[in-house]
């Protein structure tokens, strides 16, 4: 019997490791055809270790969805603990009495192994239930599994089921033959042993060996399937999380790099590639992202584009890139000699990365609002937004290909420095209705000693009618609180956010450098702004260009002024208010509390939350420069969000970003929602801070 174990076991091991090894080598070589990563990626610091502990060991993101998260937590830890049974199994191939040295006979270990074996079985049942309940055949595109490889997922569940029952089978038989390492504790194995005991000693002897070989065969087969399937994430998730941006791949977009080196936009190299125009233009971390997708569909379920009938699903986008990379692999691995590359790989190599017949269609690429909901949800920390913007960069800068309407936006930004083309001279018009003077920093002047903040008004704050009300409200509140501030007036130009998110990195660089120069030469240190997009660019992206400023959002500053007693809400504002988290304030920059604190400070305000709130807030549809693009596909994102906000029963929809306010106000108008107003949280606060005679 032992000879059978050794021979069959060895054959299984050689076959499985041979097949898996070949596949892993191919994947490794494919990764080597990609671009180098930026140096900071490989650094191992406290943030990286914390991320690894929270995301991988603690399964933090997965647990935000309680039922599947708990099932996955049990499966993950089950795989770790049951790894010990693998050692026991391989040991038993050559020694029937094998046990792990030191701890291998302890009852607690036997219990732990059996506990997780049962837990994994239960988790498999939960996963099966979830998949049946949310199957695409039943829910259509609303199913998060829509477009995933369903057969492969069922096969994996079946394999996990096989791993567990074969494990319990041979352990039960081991108990009956007297070869089990644990005297007690292994409750599930003992239960199986009681069932097998009546079969007699010889039968249990055979079952032990057959069960052991079956169990190892299933595990090794599982290994082969995993490395050939989407469940490769079992191996790639850990390095992928470790190498992901910390604390998350949101906020700033990454500087453009070509061949692993930063592109000098003053003097770009002739061979510099701006963005990603082919799969091999991605970095190997990008490739690792594609290989790590579990097809869980969490990103898809939260994506505003997908949820409103657009063709963009972040999951399908990542899957398409992965499938393309694998299909093109023979071509990429062949180096310069493509004579022996098969026809399919050659055809795949000819497909454009983006195009009507491409891997990613333009409708998919341009549907993204860069809201970050996908990045927020992804349990393996895939960096969708970076990949999407990188592909846009190539389209815009290298191919001059972008939606027709974007041309107007880009032209206005280039010529007037704002998306509406109003021009610098009109940037102070919003101040006309104020009953106190706003100090303006003239050209070449430095910040006066007594001015604490530079109020960055932003293009919307200066030109958009609704947003100018917010600018005035904030100016009045700062004035009331005795905060000295100045504005740049005609010295301000667009931060470049829409240009950058559209992919026009050249224009972003031009606008941002101009602003950094203006702010730095004026000696500005502290900036307050009402626009979530300006807040993100100034605070997170300008440091990439040497602009280091302390940037606060107006909700943060006002909340502090309230706490310090420099602002006092005196009049109740009797209203049910719901708050919409702007993506670039909340998800991208984690400012969740300040706007709610402001609303909470006003007597009479009854704050009610929409279903999708805070980290799971649903985009208004304006981000990623989509504010200036048409939305011909599917239904409108702003109306979807507006419906949800109206459903809270609120009379006031409060937000903290001019673009959100515009989009939601349009949504309310579209729905003809009587008695519902959309406004900035600062406006609600101002109504309460103003003395009765001022308010009238
Ligand atoms: S950033 Fe938002 S819109 Fe873009 S793919 Fe992700 S979830 Fe969808
Ligand atoms: S990208 Fe992330 S969230 Fe989306 S399906 Fe893949 S693993 Fe899941």
Image (tube, rainbow, N blue to C red):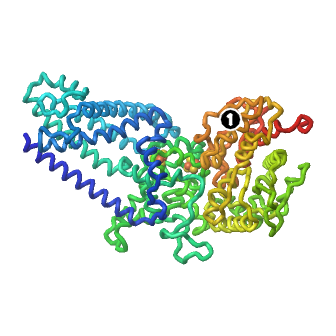
Q: Along the horizontal axis of the image, is 150 left or right of 629?
A: left
Mark 1: secondary structure:
helix
Up the image or down, 107 lies above or below 330; here it is above
Residue 351 visible at all: no
Q: Nearer the viewer, residue 409 or 122?
A: 122
Up the image or down, 31 lies above or below 118; here it is below
Which residue is found at the position 49% from the left and 40% from the top?
A: 144
- The image shows residue 238 at horizontal and vertical percentages of 40, 50
- The image shows residue 352 at horizontal and vertical percentages of 49, 63
Q: Mark 1: give few (<14), some (14-19) or many (20+) Cα within 10 Å.
A: many
Q: Along the horizontal axis of the image, is 384 left or right of 498?
A: left
- The image shows residue 559 at horizontal and vertical percentages of 72, 42
- In which quadrant will I find the N terminus? top left
All told, the count of numbered labels is 1
Which residue is found at the position 17% from the left and 43% from the top?
A: 91
Quadrant position of residue 90 = top left
Q: Along the horizontal axis of the image, is 248 left or right of 327?
A: right
Quadrant position of residue 420 = bottom right
- In which quadrant will I find the C terminus? top right
Q: Nearer the viewer, residue 552 or 275?
A: 552
Residue 633 visible at all: yes
- The image shows residue 122 at horizontal and vertical percentages of 35, 30
Q: Which residue is mark 1?
A: 645
Q: Is mark 1 within 8 Å of ligand 1?
A: no
Quadrant position of residue 647 = top right
Up the image or down, 482 lies above or below 605; here it is below
């Amino acid at each position: 019997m032992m000879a059978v174990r050794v021979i069959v076991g060895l054959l299984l091991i050689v076959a499985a490791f041979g097949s898996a090894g070949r596949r892993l080598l191919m994947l490794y070589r494919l990764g080597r055809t990609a671009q180098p990563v930026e140096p900071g990626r490989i650094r191992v610091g406290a943030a990286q270790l914390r991320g690894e502990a929270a995301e991988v060991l603690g399964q933090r993101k997965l647990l935000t969805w309680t039922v599947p998260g708990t099932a996955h937590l049990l499966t993950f830890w089950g795989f770790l603990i049951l790894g010990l049974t693998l050692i026991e199994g391989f040991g038993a191939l050559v020694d029937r009495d094998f046990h792990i040295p030191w701890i291998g006979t302890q009852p607690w270990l036997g219990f732990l192994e059996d506990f997780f074996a049962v837990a994994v079985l239960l988790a498999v049942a939960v996963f099966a239930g979830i998949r049946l309940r949310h199957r695409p055949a039943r829910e259509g595109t609303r199913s998060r599994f829509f477009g995933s490889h369903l057969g492969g997922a069922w096969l994996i569940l079946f394999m996990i089921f096989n791993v567990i029952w074969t494990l319990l089978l041979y352990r039960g038989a081991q108990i009956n033959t007297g070869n089990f390492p644990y005297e007690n504790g292994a409750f599930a194995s003992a239960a199986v042993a009681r069932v097998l005991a009546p079969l007699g000693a010889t039968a249990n002897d055979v079952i032990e060996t057959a069960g052991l070989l079956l169990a190892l065969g299933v595990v090794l087969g599982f290994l082969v399937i995993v490395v050939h399937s989407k469940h490769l994430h079992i191996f790639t998730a850990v390095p992928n999380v470790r190498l992901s941006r910390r604390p998350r791949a949101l906020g700033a977009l990454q500087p453009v790099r070509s061949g692993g080196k930063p592109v000098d936009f003053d003097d770009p190299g002739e061979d510099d590639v701006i963005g990603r125009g082919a799969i091999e233009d991605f970095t190997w971390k990008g490739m690792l992202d594609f290989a790590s997708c579990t097809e869980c569909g969490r990103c898809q379920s939260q994506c505003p584009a997908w949820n409103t009938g657009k063709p963009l699903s972040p999951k399908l986008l990542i899957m398409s890139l992965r499938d393309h990379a694998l299909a093109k692999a023979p071509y990429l691995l062949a180096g310069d000699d493509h004579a022996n590359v098969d026809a399919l790989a050659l055809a795949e190599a000819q497909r454009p990365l983006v195009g009507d017949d491409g891997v990613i269609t333009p409708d998919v690429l341009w549907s993204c609002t860069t809201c970050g909901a996908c990045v927020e949800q992804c349990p393996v920390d895939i960096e969708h937004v970076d990949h999407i913007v990188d592909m846009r960069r190539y389209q815009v800068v290298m191919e001059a290909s972008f939606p027709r309407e974007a041309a107007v936006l880009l032209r206005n930004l280039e010529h007037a420095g704002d998306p509406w083309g109003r021009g610098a001279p009109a940037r102070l018009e919003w101040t006309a209705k104020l009953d106190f003077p706003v100090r303006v920093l003239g050209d070449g002047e430095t910040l006066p000693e007594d001015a604490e903040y530079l109020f960055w008004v932003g293009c919307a704050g200066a030109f958009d009618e609704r947003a100018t009300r917010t600018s005035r409200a904030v100016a009045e509140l700062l004035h009331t609180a005795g905060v000295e501030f100045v504005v740049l007036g005609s010295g301000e130009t667009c931060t470049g956010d829409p240009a950058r998110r559209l992919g026009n990195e050249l224009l972003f660089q031009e606008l941002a450098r101009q602003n950094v120069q203006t702010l730095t030469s004026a000696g500005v240190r502290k900036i307050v702004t009402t626009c979530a997009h300006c807040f993100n660019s100034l605070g997170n992206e300008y440091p990439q260009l040497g602009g280091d400023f302390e940037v606060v959002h107006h909700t943060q500053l006002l909340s502090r002024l309230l706490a310090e007693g420099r602002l006092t809400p005196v009049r109740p504002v009797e209203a049910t208010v719901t708050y919409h988290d702007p993506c670039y304030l909340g998800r991208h920059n984690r400012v969740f509390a300040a706007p709610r604190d402001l609303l909470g400070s006003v007597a009479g305000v009854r704050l009610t939350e929409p279903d999708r709130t805070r980290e799971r807030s649903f985009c208004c549809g304006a981000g990623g420069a989509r504010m200036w693009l048409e939305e011909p596909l599917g239904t409108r994102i702003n109306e979807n969000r507006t419906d949800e906000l109206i459903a809270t029963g609120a009379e006031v929809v409060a937000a903290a970003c001019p673009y959100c306010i515009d989009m939601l106000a349009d949504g309310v108008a579209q729905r003809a929602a009587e008695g519902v107003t959309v406004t900035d949280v600062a406006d609600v606060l101002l109504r309460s801070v103003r003395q009765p005679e001022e308010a009238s």
